[in-house]
Amino acid sequence: MSGRGVTFARGFSAGAVAAGVRDPSSERPDLALLVADRPCVAAGVFTSNQVIAAPCVVTRRHLAAGPLRGLVANSGSANACTGERGERDALAMAEAAARTIGARAAEMAVASTGVIGVPLPMERVLPAIAAVRPSSGGWEDFARAIMTTDTRPKLAEREVWLRGRPVRVGGVAKGAGMIHPDMATLLVFLTTDARLDAATADRALRGAVAGSFNAISVDGDTSTNDMALLLASGAAEVDVAGDALEPFAQALGEVCHDLALQVVADGEGATKVFAVRVRGAASAEDARKAARTVTSSSLVKTAIHGADPNWGRILAAAGRSGARVDARRASVLIGGLAVFARGAPADPDPAAVRRAFESSSIEIDLDLGLGQGSATAWGCDLSAQYVRINAEYTT
Amino acid sequence: MSGRGVTFARGFSAGAVAAGVRDPSSERPDLALLVADRPCVAAGVFTSNQVIAAPCVVTRRHLAAGPLRGLVANSGSANACTGERGERDALAMAEAAARTIGARAAEMAVASTGVIGVPLPMERVLPAIAAVRPSSGGWEDFARAIMTTDTRPKLAEREVWLRGRPVRVGGVAKGAGMIHPDMATLLVFLTTDARLDAATADRALRGAVAGSFNAISVDGDTSTNDMALLLASGAAEVDVAGDALEPFAQALGEVCHDLALQVVADGEGATKVFAVRVRGAASAEDARKAARTVTSSSLVKTAIHGADPNWGRILAAAGRSGARVDARRASVLIGGLAVFARGAPADPDPAAVRRAFESSSIEIDLDLGLGQGSATAWGCDLSAQYVRINAEYTT
């Protein structure tokens, strides 16, 4: 972890307390507030899962209603599949948070993560919201409070000079499991002190998410609670428009990319990360499909876990990805070493292949030899520890 | 295992020898022949993976050329991603097998399973083919020779009376890993002594595969070598036409279903199987998508492994399946026990839910509450043993 996350940008404070959402006796912070000094232009992307959690529904509505003043988030319960009560509870969280910071409920975002199908213990959640004391130093408490099976907080920040002034972008993410986002990953909160209009904020967020959170996979499952939010305070007094657009988008993209790779590296049970760079695909969409499918193949992931140089599984995964693949034209490189060249096995030194597979960060290049499409995706290995974590998640 | 597999039907013999495909010093049978007394009407379905193995290419060509006299199969190497040499080797196997049994090469099917990207050791394979002595008692040798990580042979048989005569259908399958067929599973060989025309054989095989091998998942990966073949000797002297069509199709379907469930139960590292019965879907295709996605979700599979009653993952998987899902109308039952009813958590006895999850054969019912579509799919749990098997597959 590095940086001050959501409080790096000027105009934001954060804090967290232990509400005991899942376990009343726990003292681990599990309820967090992010507060902006002033109303923020905001943008959000949400899970593409049709089973969408109540806090996502409420936040989407509040986003559509105008600027945001902050957000309230909890871990321990996803408040998903909780029926009509779920939406009432999410709204009650927004109302309590709004009271705490002197805002309106519709100015608050709500996010939850944890077990699906378990209602929130509102008798503990509401008093906890009133007890949070946000500060400019609260970034780490905030980051820890939204963790579930994450082993470490995930923070990132960038500063970029626009029109002669420093503009800050920071963020926090939580990940670990159910990671194969189709809109965003579990929870990502980004803040900036740049001044953005709503359309620019939306475009910048979608662009940054596409190349980062939507390009990683831990286990191929898409959460019911995925949410990525960007809040722009404007405190830096720099308008992001014209020639400032591109450097701002780049800074935001870098923060998202940094957080996304932290999420993969801290995937449940992960001991290694790997990048799959596809080029020569018939289209960019084909490249993305092939790269995503290879990163989510259980057989590729276990081979990487065991440093087993079973590269044929990479081609087999690409071949079922839906992308156009012709094995006679394809090439595969592991750590820069050709193992399959234009349709036939290459004959690399087995010890060198083995060494490439043993690296804790593996680069796989797949050239489909068909066109100009390219894309990169990132994944982690599949270990026995992943199984252990998920075989006893609620118990 | 039960039955005499491919030699249950009259007119077939089988045998196997140790060729040492993967390990020259191994005495495990890994090369098998199936021989028909006379030319057989034949049908086949093959992997939908675009990276298709050489033996599938050769067999598809031979099927199109007319009746088959038999097949040669090996384990230890998939002969996939082996370049132009792969096709020459597969053809050389067909030629050697044809010589051994006095047929033409174009009358032989060829099948391979094992590691991808490793050429076949033809200097050992060709002499082994000549050394096989097929007999009517060779079903188990045959079944064992095509195993890779399978822990037991998979055999099934049915006898059905058609037009006053007994007609036999038998089969053998190998499975274990890379099981999420989109056309057929790894290797399935079916024989019958019924008399079929080619179109009827093709239709009957496709129907039987759809409800069996195409409805199971072990790890979501689709093999490069999937192949299901049906050979009909006609030795029972009963034509499958008119009112004999339906009972024959049923017998074939039962053999395939029996074999498919054996494949799931012997999935790599599997300790439990589960069925997902979806009804109330907007369409049959939606029901199939939802059922298949739930059976292949790593999070559902690990929860079942650990008997963790984390049923929210079932809804989350359905929600990302591409099927239309509205959580407010959905219901979920585990072992007949309602855990989620028309959009809200039910309140079942936790001990009863736990017991339902502890069963070695779990039935999950998912009613989407939207229409008339229904489908069932079968899967197995994901264990640490799966990871171990696949982390060191080639080493």
Image (cartoon, coloured by chain):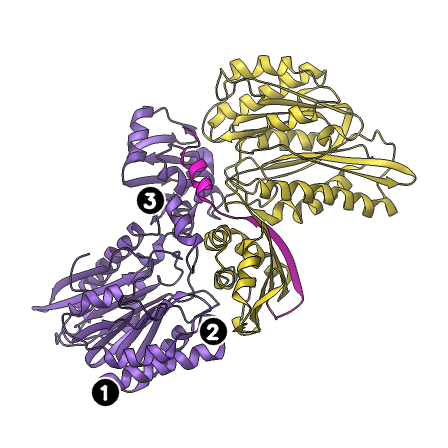
Chain colours: A yellow, B purple
Please report the bounds of the magenta region as a residue range: A368-395
Quadrant holding the C terminus of chain A? top left
Measured in 3D between alpha carbons, the distance from the residue under mark 2 to the one under mark 1, in whole angstroms, is 29 Å
**Mark 1: which amino acid?**
Gly
Relative to A333, say whether B12 is above or below: below
Chain assignment, label 1 = B
Q: Is residue B200 left or right of residue A79?
A: left
Measured in 3D between alpha carbons, the distance from the residue under mark 1 to the one under mark 3, in whole angstroms, is 48 Å
Horizontal and vertical percent for residue B289? 42, 50
Q: Which mark is residue A235?
A: none
**Mark 2: which amino acid?**
Thr
Between B205 and A15, the one nearer to me in the picture: A15
**Mark 3: which amino acid?**
Arg
Residue B190 image-quadrant placement: bottom left
Q: Is residue A388 magenta?
A: yes
Q: Which mark is residue B277?
A: 3
Q: Which residue is mark 2?
A: B82
Q: Which residue is mark 1?
A: B102
Relative to A202, say whether A132 is above or below: above
